[in-house]
Image (spheres, helix red, strand yellow):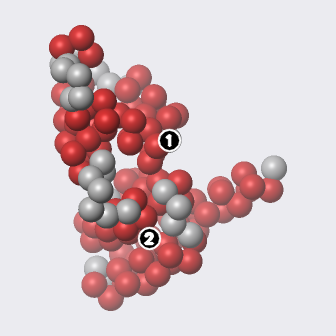
Amino acid sequence: MSAAERLPGDSYDAGLEVRKQVLGTEHVARATANSTNFTDEFQEMITRYAWGTIWTRDGLPRTTRSAITLTALIAGGYWEELEMHVHAALRNGMTADEIKEVFLQSAIYCSVPAANTAFKIGKAVLAEYEAQDAK
């Protein structure tokens, strides 16, 4: 659906704004730029429904949504998405210690091997953040 076809107040617009806030403007710009005729509708769907109707809700703070998302990604073994959402969790205000606690909790309920991979990914993301802060 083109921007001209959307109604004012459409959940897509709110979703796009939250998606940029959580994942970063650069990530969303890349995803949009890399979208094709084949993937356009998927990008539209996740922006409207995941970001525009779930992440915009008032019922949970973004840090809690991030913790839930990290756990779900660990449980499913979605490692590329986990890396992206560790970045998002930090952007949402989670601390390294809170992310560590989520990973430890996940070791019990999702598996130690899954948590081991999550710690490896989290360690790399945190090292990136520390390197940026050192600049």
Which numbered mark, 1 or 2, is in the foreground of this view?
Answer: 1
Locate residue 115, reporting x and y percent.
40, 77
Locate residue 103, reporting x and y percent.
43, 77
Q: Is residue 32 above or below residue 92?
A: above
Question: In what quadrant of the picture does the N terminus appear?
Answer: top left
Question: Residue 106 appears in which quarter of the rendering?
Answer: bottom left
Locate residue 131, reporting x and y percent.
73, 56
Q: Is residue 113 visible?
A: no
Labels 1 and 2: the sequence-earlier one: 1
Q: Is residue 125 above or below residue 67?
A: above
Left or right of 114, for residue 127 = right
The CA distance from mark 1 to mark 2 is 21 Å
Amino acid residing under circle 1: Gly
The residue located at (45%, 28%) in the rendering is 29
**Secondary element at image label 2:** helix
The residue located at (65%, 57%) in the rendering is 129
Amino acid residing under circle 2: Ala
Q: Is residue 78 visible?
A: yes
Viewer-side residue, 104 vs 63: 63
Q: Which mark is residue 118?
A: 2
Tell me how many marks there are: 2
**Secondary element at image label 1:** loop
The residue located at (46%, 43%) in the rendering is 21
To which residue does mark 1 refer? 24
Q: Is residue 69 above or below residue 108?
A: above
